[in-house]
Image (tube, rainbow, N blue to C red):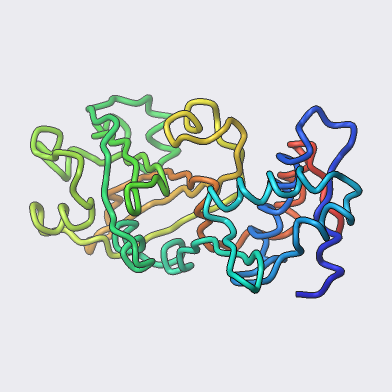
Amino acid sequence: MRSDRFESISIDRRSSVSYDDQIKESIKALILDQTFYYQALLPTPQQLAKLLNVETELTEKAYKKLVKENYIKYIDPKGYVVAYFELTNYFFYRNIAIYDAISALGLSPSIECIEKKVVQLTDAELQSMGFNTGEKLFYINRIYKGNDKPIIILENYIPLSIFKDMDKKFTGTEPLNAYMDKEYNLKAKLSFRVTKAVNLSSKLASILGERKNAASIESTNKVYDQFDRLIDYGQSHTTSSYYFQALVTREEMLSYYQKEQIPLTT
């Protein structure tokens, strides 16, 4: 990695956010926009401290936090390298189930169901999702994990006019696509996803064990079956440690991190 990229790591001395957290978040942003790519060698804590004109203790603290969150790892004698997990863009732009995508990372997938219930939304809400007015929906809110660590939280809205009695039979821990195929002989044929970089809300951060306003990729998804019917409307948020590869521009990420008062140089 060229040394001039190190200068992209920056801090704002006017911010109330601690320097070590600013350094950590700045590096996260650079990993997310692939300025610092997988297995790239990072500056040593001493080099970075000199560049930022701060105590080495602060850069060491930032690196320890990044190691704990699975962003980077230390390889002796090479040094600190980028080690974040990345789910292929097939997840976002083709119809690949989250459960299968996590398996593809070499992780053991599991699902924790937080909530499931029948909901009756307003006609305006239903139309904005793409459902018919008056439709009753089965709402499911679940955390997908890899090796028992949260990776993504996913909310699904399922039309009960198609999936009759699903609210009574679905336990909440089954992979959704596989369940639909097995129980209703319906396959998820086509998926349309829209992604963007966001801050995690207090509620989502608490559920995922993250801090408020942590970086996340939000995905809104519509899934259609083999008969071209809308069978699932979903919205997901990743944890900050597991960025899913997506078409998010550097300008979007710069704008996002500026909201957290963590400036990045371009």
Query: What x and y, as percent, mark residue 179?
Result: 15, 53
**Camera-nearest residue between 5 and 142:** 5
**Is residue 245 found left or right of 164 in the rendered image?**
right
Quarter of the image for residue 54 reads: top right
Q: Quadrant of the N terminus?
A: bottom right
Task: Tell me if residue 178 comes above or below residue 18 in the rendering.
Answer: below
At 38% from the left and 24% from the top, the residue drawn is: 122
**Camera-nearest residue between 191 and 90:** 90
Q: Residue furthest front?
A: 77
At 69% from the left and 66% from the top, the residue drawn is: 36
Quarter of the image for residue 6 reads: bottom right
**Is residue 76 found left or right of 184 in the rendered image?**
right
**How many badges with numbers are in the image?**
0
**Camera-nearest residue between 62 and 115:** 62
**Is residue 191 found left or right of 34 in the rendered image?**
left
Query: What x and y, as percent, mark residue 136?
Result: 24, 31
**Is residue 170 found left or right of 59 in the rendered image?**
left
At 8% from the left and 38% from the top, the residue drawn is: 169
Query: What x and y, as percent, mark residue 124?
Result: 43, 29
Task: Tell me if residue 49 comes above or below residue 44 in the rendering.
Answer: above
At 27% from the left and 29% from the top, the residue drawn is: 115
Q: Quadrant of the C terminus?
A: bottom right
Query: What x and y, as percent, mark residue 192?
Result: 43, 58
Quarter of the image for residue 248 reads: bottom right
